Amino acid sequence: MASADVVIVGGGANGTSTAFHLTRLGARNVLLLERRWLGAGATGKSGALVRMHYTNEHESRLALESLKVFQNFDAEVGGDCGFEPVGFVQLVGRGYEDHLRRNVAMQQRIGIKTELVSPEDLTRLLPGASTDDVGGAAWEPESGFADPNATAFAFAAAAIRGGARIETARDVTRVVVEHGRVVGVETHEGRVAAPVVVLVPGAWAGRLLEPLGLDFGLEPYRIQVSIFRWPAGLVRRDPAVIDAVHESWMRPEGGAATLIGVELGAGHADPDHYNESVDREYVALCRAKLSARFPAFARATMRGGWAGMIMMSPDGRPIIDRIPSIDGLYVMLGDSGTSFKTSPAIGRCLAEWIVEGRPRTADLTPFRSTRFAEGKPWIDESNYGSERLTISR
Ligand SMILES: Cc1cc2nc3c(=O)[nH]c(=O)nc-3n(C[C@H](O)[C@H](O)[C@H](O)COP(=O)(O)OP(=O)(O)OC[C@H]3O[C@@H](n4cnc5c(N)ncnc54)[C@H](O)[C@@H]3O)c2cc1C
């Protein structure tokens, strides 16, 4: 029977980051199993915004630690993650000015480079934007977006250089547990013995968790994005934006287009049979939201789009944990459409936990799997109007 010290299930940004960080901390016999190909899940479809603005300190800390990796990717990991520091603007509606102030103060306190932006500066940062409905804005000069596929490929290549094995087209059908502890995984090509298993299966987690009796209320969602060519006369690459008023986010795509995701486009779907194309109604919705903020886009040509699958947790925050009831089982579940930007830190935390006995990079207690059973789902006091959003959170 094949064996490994650690088996990772899932070859997205979080699985490959975990594999890389495990090898960096000295773990040798690391095996990552991916049922399709690297980046086949949410990672490959991600908008890949890299920003640190969250309405809670815990995710902001993970994002800050991760930004340091995106900024120095070649030195830290090796290769190119396609990080483009175009800057980031968070827009909030009227009535949320105090929440924004509190969040920016929290972010500054933990070392994030960010500031509140006056209406005049906002016009300078986003020329052509219609801002009458904006209550406040925050600016992150160092944020931007990355290439999510390149990031996962580079993490995987670095893990392999560090001694890990990565096998694609390898479907894990079951986590094998005996007497309350993990002893390996079953795949369609036989069993792999391992004392530690890390589950990072994205929207496909259900069929692995169910036989283990683990139910965290996770739900797979199909989310979409679409791309609009800049209209005539528009030649400037704007910063990335999250627009809490219009529940949308956008960023440059290539040299002359904008990629937009709209919250209202999210909906349930079967991750094994979902439509990977963008819906016609969704394109119209994106055009409406984009042109509500940037009126010139009312005459923009749609140039493409796609759909991907994410896994929502009941409170819209990921679950990152060592499962208390099953020795040797670690998880990163319920990515909730927001866990690309934090994947460098999440992988590092999981690797520290496995190799050193505890995560050092960040406190993962708020991400614990038991919070739902405890009746303490995560709630951000200073949100911007909708507590449980997916992609524009
Ligand atoms: C359209 C879209 C836009 C997004 N925008 C952003 C954004 O701007 N910023 C941001 O931070 N996040 C964003 N996200 C979310 C982000 O992409 C995800 O949170 C992140 O990529 C999750 O990575 P992951 O490695 O946890 O999971 P995934 O990338 O989903 O990887 C899971 C992998 O596990 C594999 N797998 C599943 N089951 C098995 C099995 N039984 N055996 C073997 N392999 C298995 C799957 O094939 C898959 O490759 C977006 C997502 C989408 C879809």
Image (cartoon, rainbow, N blue to C red):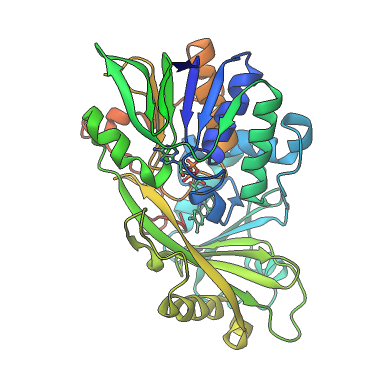
Q: Position of residue 341 (x, y in %)?
A: 57, 44
Report how many numbered discs are placed on residues in the image.
Answer: 0
Residue at x-position 54% and y-position 56%: 45
**Left or right position of 270 against 29:** left
The part of the image, by quadrant, that contains residue 234 is: bottom right
Judge whether residue 387 can be spotted in this image: no
Q: Position of residue 122 (x, y in %)?
A: 65, 66
* Residue 199 sits above or below residue 360 on the image: below
Quadrant in which the N terminus appears: top left
Residue at x-position 73% and y-position 40%: 71
Quadrant in which the C terminus appears: bottom left
Residue at x-position 33% and y-position 26%: 175
Q: Position of residue 200 (x, y in %)?
A: 44, 35
**Left or right position of 185 against 97:** left
Residue at x-position 39% and y-position 32%: 367
* Residue 293 sits above or below residue 169 on the image: below
The part of the image, by quadrant, that contains residue 172 is: top left
* Residue 214 sits above or below residue 137 on the image: above
**Left or right position of 360 against 275:** right
Q: Nearer the viewer, residue 321 or 161?
A: 161
Judge whether residue 303 can be spotted in this image: yes
Q: Position of residue 21 (x, y in %)?
A: 61, 24
Q: Nearer the viewer, residue 65 or 13?
A: 13
**Left or right position of 363 against 367:** right
